[in-house]
Amino acid sequence: MFKKLTAHTAGTTDTKSLQRAWLLQLYKEHERICWQYGVRLAVPIMEISTSSANWGSWHPASKTIRISDRLIQLHTWDVVINILKHEMAHQVVSELFRSHDAHGSLFDQACDLLGVPGEFRGASGDLPRMILDARARATASPHRNLLLKIEKLLALAESGNEHEALLAMEKANYLIAKYNIRRIEQSQEACYECLIINHKSRRIENYQRKICSILVNHFFVKIVLADLFDAEQCRTHKTIEILGTSENVLIANYVYCFLLAQMDSLWRQFQHSHQTTGRQKRSYCLGVLEGFAGKLAGQKQQNLPGENHAPAIPANLSVQVCSNDQGLIRFMEERHPRLSRKKFSSARVYLKEYEAGCHDGSNLTLNKGISSEDGYQGRMLPHRR
């Protein structure tokens, strides 16, 4: 006789399966972190706890790391990894430093060793209950007015007058460049962020890599293509990490969302007018991005006539600034101490559709006319209440 599976036992079975998958992934993360940072630690016992008071804990007597199931359920896996690194820092203090230092100088040294971000270094009870996203943190930024000015210029870039729209986009680019030049020249302190774009996919498309190239070449950020575990689906997805100052990360993320939305919109218009099939979409979209990248580069090399135009910007300024930004370099090394570089083969394209995309992309103006899923309707910052 087969035992009848009730709703309760089914739920229990699902929960146990999830927790087994989480535990397996935590063991993998522990091994990966040790390899990344060149630290030799014994493999601990991993447990999923039901604690609502602490996100994680390290127990030296039993060599056990406990991670709260509520943490996994309420936050992204990137947050889980940082809590795990916090507990591993306690393990470093116990095993490598032979100390019982809770959150003193030795613990700080262990956090430096494992690249634990500042907001994850507090005592268990002090760890943030809610991890603020980049937008929320930038609301209190001293450069908040810069983002508001850029938003206003992008709103002007929606103008039906092509000259006014181009001028507004040009001025927005100039403000971004001016902020970054002054920041590097004056060695201003900056808050660095890592914003993760996760499309819940196992691959990064060619057009996504092209957008990343645009962000690196023109918007003062670094890009890392990485992997991130999804605790709900129990599978690993390919992600895009945007790293830079809080302001640059928000602007770059805005541009990424804008280009994705515009590609789809332009493709639908092109497909309708030319009665083409979906097979040519990739070629057309790559063309749009190439045309837009060419427009950005052209704006930096020469200006349109007129007194109101901003000064010219060096074509490779973004790469130069990021190469000289020691704070960003340290931030990247802390997060990704062992980065590998891979070359990707170029995509085959349908020439006709690609050239049509290049033409449409060269006429594309960065503006505020997008609606994002998070409800900000194309704004970089949430409204203050």
Image (cartoon, rainbow, N blue to C red):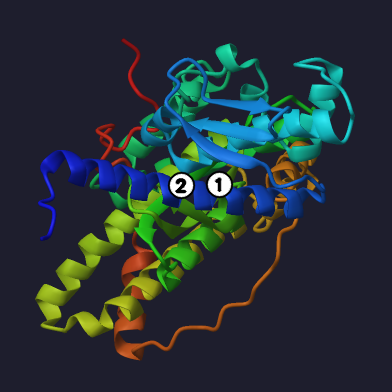
Looking at the rendered image, the quarter that the C terminus falls into is top left
Pinpoint residue 147: horizontal percent, then vertical percent.
47, 28
Cβ–Cβ under 8 Å for marks 2 and 1 = yes
- Kindly identify the amino acid type of the residue bearing the numbered disc 2: Trp
Q: Identify the disc placed on residue 22.
A: 2
Q: Where 265 falls versus 126 (above or below)?
A: below
Return the x and y of residue 27 as percentages of the image width and height: 59, 50
Q: Is residue 325 left or right of residue 5?
A: right
Q: Give the distance between the C-alpha atoms of the residues marked 2 and 1, in whole angstroms.
A: 6 Å
Figure quadrant of the N terminus: bottom left
Q: Is residue 96 left or right of residue 310?
A: right
Residue 190, image x, y percentages: 68, 27
**Badge 1: residue crowd in 10 Å (few <14, some 14–19, many ≥20):** many
Circle 2 Cα neighbour tier, 10 Å, few/some/many (<14 / 14–19 / ≥20) = many
Mark 1 residue type: Leu
Residue 322 percent location from the top left of the image: 71, 47
Which of 116 and 185 lies nearest the eye of the viewer?
Answer: 116
User: SS of the residue at dot 2?
Assistant: helix
Residue at x-position 74% and y-position 42%: 334
Residue 26 numbered mark, or none: 1
Answer above or below: position of 206 versus 184. Answer: below
Examine the image and state in which quarter residue 122 appears: top right
Label count reads 2
